[in-house]
Amino acid sequence: MNVLVVVETQRSTMQIFFRCLAIFGLSVTTTAFAATDENVPLATPHGGWNYSGMTDKTADTSVTYPYSPIDRGAQRNRTLIKGHIAAAGKNRVPKLVVNGNPLPLNTDAEGRYARHYAFGGGSNGVELKDADGKNLKRVQFYEANPNQQLPKLRIICAWDAPEAEVDLHILTPDAEHITYFNPVLKTGGGLDIDSVDGPGPEMFSTSTPLHGVYNIYINYWGNLNESGYNFDQSQLQKPIITTRITLVFNENTPSEKRETFVVPLRKIGELNFIKSFVY
């Protein structure tokens, strides 16, 4: 039996892969190519077949936003979504749609962006749209690693002001408070790395949610400008920040359900109760 595999050249990783296939009596034909040029709308993930830990770099730690975030290591085992588009400006923000979840996509001054996402097994999709909703690039790939579990519960908080610092707070049935200072659940999963300098999103996901009551809050923590963090209401660049909170249950399965809330934030320090639900 022959297996055709298209891979990015990573010698040590592929040697392990070949040995695994040899155990099952499979032969492999490979097509190697250089790393994708970043000067494209969507450089990674690649379309087609994917196997976490072999054909991607999910174990690597890297910066996930145009600004430097706090690195707690919680972004390991996330797949990096990155690319390069024309800088859009504050009022022309493109959109990244991941498995149907729309996220504002802020870039650096040169138009580059990078986001992490904790993809589950099976079919996944990433779509990049411009500020007018026109499709720039769409990639569909199949995650074939059987150890890549599906998130049974995901909560996403995104907002439309890159200078704003908005924090997601989750209270779990066993009284854990998951947020930037306590991002990892004892039962598995937790909060992706904290976007301390905007523009989000912040994302909570777990494949092993406890049964019981969950409470969701968001906090308008502060703003960032050339002088650093500030909490001065008079320095707000926008009078209202629009946040979008999305709950996704059983993502990527036939029983997937989602619920979205659009919440305006007007005042620094404001804490908003979003929803209480029973899982």
Image (tube, helix red, strand yellow):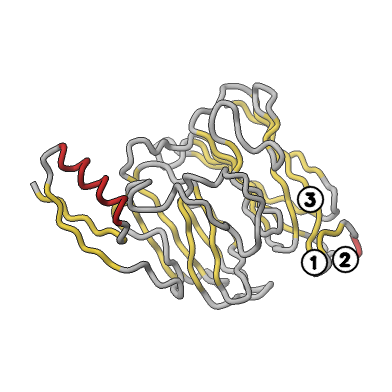
Farthest-out residue, left: 1
| Label pair 2/1, CB-CB below 8 angstroms | yes
Q: Is residue 279 left or right of residue 216?
A: left
Residue 220 marker: 3
- Name which residue type carries label 2: Gln
The residue tagged with tag 1: helix, strand or loop?
strand
The residue labelled by disc 2 is 235
Q: Quadrant of the C terminus?
A: top right
Please state which of the two labelled residues, at mark 1 or mark 3, is closer to the viewer.
1
- Name which residue type carries label 3: Tyr
Please state which of the two labelled residues, at mark 2 or mark 1, is closer to the viewer.
1
Task: Determine whether 109 is above or below 189 in the image.
Answer: below
The residue labelled by disc 1 is 225
Quarter-of-image position of residue 184? top right
Task: Determine whether 205 is above or below 195 in the image.
Answer: above
- Residue 179 picture location, percent across and down: 69, 39
- Name which residue type carries label 1: Asn
Mark 1 / mark 3, whichever is N-terminal: 3
Q: CA distance from mark 2 to mark 3?
A: 14 Å
| Label pair 2/3, CB-CB below 8 angstroms | no
